[in-house]
Every structure is written in structure tokens, then in C-alpha cells.
Image (cartoon, rainbow, N blue to C red):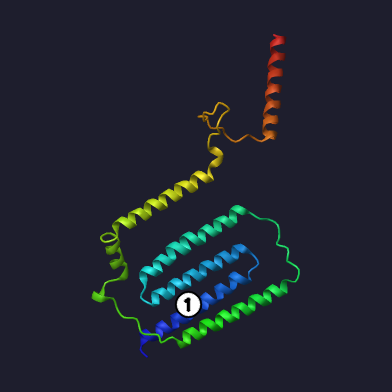
């Protein structure tokens, strides 16, 4: 065993322990925010494993899509919900935990059997010594340019639709005549501020009237 193989084995052990620990944190943490952060750790560990397999493009896509988009979207959804109530445990919750443990152990045994029974082969270098990212980029902008641009247009349409749905309160409501209103209304001010401002305005008006009468 040379130095490169030893570094790969140590890196694989660290990434595997990080992935298993993060996955356990996702399941065992009672706070859903901590579970979301642990899920980001799982995605980062998987990206590191892809790097060990010489899949630099898949590793970068893993970081950009899952960590930078999916996990951030989950965190935004959790923060927008802003649930302040504590979760109430269900009666006989230990039955569900026991069933979950049995299913998890069964899946672990199945995957371990598949890993041990599969004849794994060593990864072969890329033909020509080029990186997979360079090859995929060349195919994207030559052979698959039209599908690539169509996918970007579809993503842009989905983003615009999401923005319109999120800002629905600013859309004009149809009037009784059937024609859409062109004036957008601002949110109503709190009643306390309105009453305070009305009271101060009335006091100033009374003061002005009293001063004019004295004159």
C-alpha cells in the first residue's frame, strides 16, 4: 500500500463516519432546524465520496443542487413556518420507534449483503486525461445545446410563477364591473398607530382653534 491509497482509505473512513453520524443526527435530533443542518452534513459527505471516485462533476452538482438549493429551501420553509409550539408525543410511541429500528436494520443488512456480494472493480481514468466536467461541458454546449437551453427556460418560468404565487396579495382584485383594478393597495396600518395619529391630529387642531379664538 502506497501513500495515495492510505490517504484514500483514511479519507473514506472520515467521510463515512461523518455521513453516518450526520444521518443519525437527522433522525435523533428533536429540533427540526438541527436535523436540517445535519442533512447538509450528509450531502457534503456524499460529495466527498464522489470526489474519491473521480467524479468531480457529480460532486460539484451535489454541493450546488442539494446543499445550495434543496437544503437551503428546507431551512427557509422551516423558518417561514415559525412553529413555536412544542411537539406532543403520541401515545405508544415506542412501537413506532421499534418498527423504525427493525426496518432500518433490515435495510442495513440488505445493503451490506449487496456491497459484499458485488465484485467491485477499480475506477479507470478518463480517456485523454480530461476531466469529466470539461467533457460534460463540451457536450452541453455542442451536442445537447437545445435541450440545455430549453431546461433553463423551463426553470426560469417556474421561478417567475413561484414569485407571482408568493406575491399574490399584491395582485389587483377584479372590480364589480368586471374590469381589473389598476391601483395596488398598501397593507393597512395598525389600528393603534392610526388612533394615536388621529388623537395627536385632533389635539393639534383644537390647539390651533383655541389660539385663533384668542387672537
Q: Is residue 19 left or right of residue 192?
A: left
Residue visible at 54% across and 29% down in the picture: 178
Which residue sits furthest left? 128
Front residue of this view, candidates 72 and 147: 147
Which residue sits furthest bottom? 1
Quadrant placement of the N terminus = bottom left
In the picture of the structure, the residue carrying the numbered disc 1 is 15
- Image location (x, y in percent) of residue 75: 55, 59
Quadrant placement of the C terminus = top right
Q: Quadrant of residue 200?
A: top right
Residue visible at 64% across and 78% down in the picture: 101
Q: Quadrant of residue 139?
A: bottom left
Q: Is residue 183 above or below residue 92?
A: above
Q: Count residues near mark 1 (Cα–Cα under 10 Å), then give few for <14, some for 14-19, many for 20+.
A: many
Q: Is residue 91 above or below residue 117?
A: above
Q: Is residue 87 left or right of residue 151?
A: right
Query: Regarding mark 1 in the picture, which secondary structure is present there?
Result: helix
Which residue sits furthest front? 178
Q: Is residue 71 above or below residue 114?
A: above
Residue visible at 75% across and 71% down in the picture: 92
Q: How many marks?
A: 1
Q: Quadrant of residue 82?
A: bottom right
- Image location (x, y in percent) of residue 114: 48, 84
- Image location (x, y in percent) of residue 100: 64, 75
- Image location (x, y in percent) of residue 187: 60, 36
Front residue of this view, candidates 64 and 178: 178
Q: Is residue 16 above or below residue 196?
A: below
Which residue sits furthest right? 91
Amino acid at each position: 500500500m502506497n501513500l495515495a491509497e492510505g490517504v484514500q482509505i483514511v479519507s473514506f473512513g472520515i467521510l463515512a463516519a461523518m455521513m453516518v453520524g450526520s444521518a443519525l443526527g437527522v433522525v435523533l435530533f428533536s429540533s427540526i432546524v438541527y436535523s436540517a443542518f445535519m442533512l447538509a452534513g450528509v450531502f457534503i459527505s456524499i460529495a466527498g465520496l464522489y470526489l474519491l471516485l473521480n467524479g468531480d462533476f457529480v460532486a460539484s452538482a451535489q454541493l450546488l443542487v442539494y446543499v445550495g438549493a434543496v437544503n437551503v429551501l428546507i431551512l427557509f420553509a422551516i423558518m417561514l413556518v415559525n412553529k413555536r409550539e412544542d411537539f406532543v408525543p403520541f401515545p405508544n410511541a415506542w412501537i413506532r420507534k421499534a418498527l423504525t429500528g427493525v426496518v432500518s436494520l433490515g435495510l442495513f443488512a440488505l445493503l451490506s449483503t449487496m456491497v459484499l456480494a458485488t465484485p467491485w472493480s477499480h475506477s479507470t481514468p478518463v480517456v485523454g486525461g480530461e476531466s469529466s466536467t470539461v467533457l460534460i461541458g463540451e457536450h452541453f454546449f455542442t451536442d445537447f445545446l437545445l435541450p440545455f437551453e430549453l431546461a433553463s427556460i423551463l426553470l426560469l418560468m417556474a421561478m417567475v410563477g413561484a414569485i407571482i404565487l408568493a406575491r399574490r396579495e399584491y395582485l389587483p382584485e377584479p372590480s364589480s364591473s368586471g374590469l381589473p383594478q389598476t391601483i395596488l393597495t398598501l397593507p393597512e396600518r395598525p389600528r393603534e398607530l392610526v388612533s394615536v395619529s388621529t388623537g395627536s391630529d385632533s389635539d393639534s387642531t383644537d390647539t390651533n382653534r383655541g389660539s385663533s379664538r384668542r387672537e
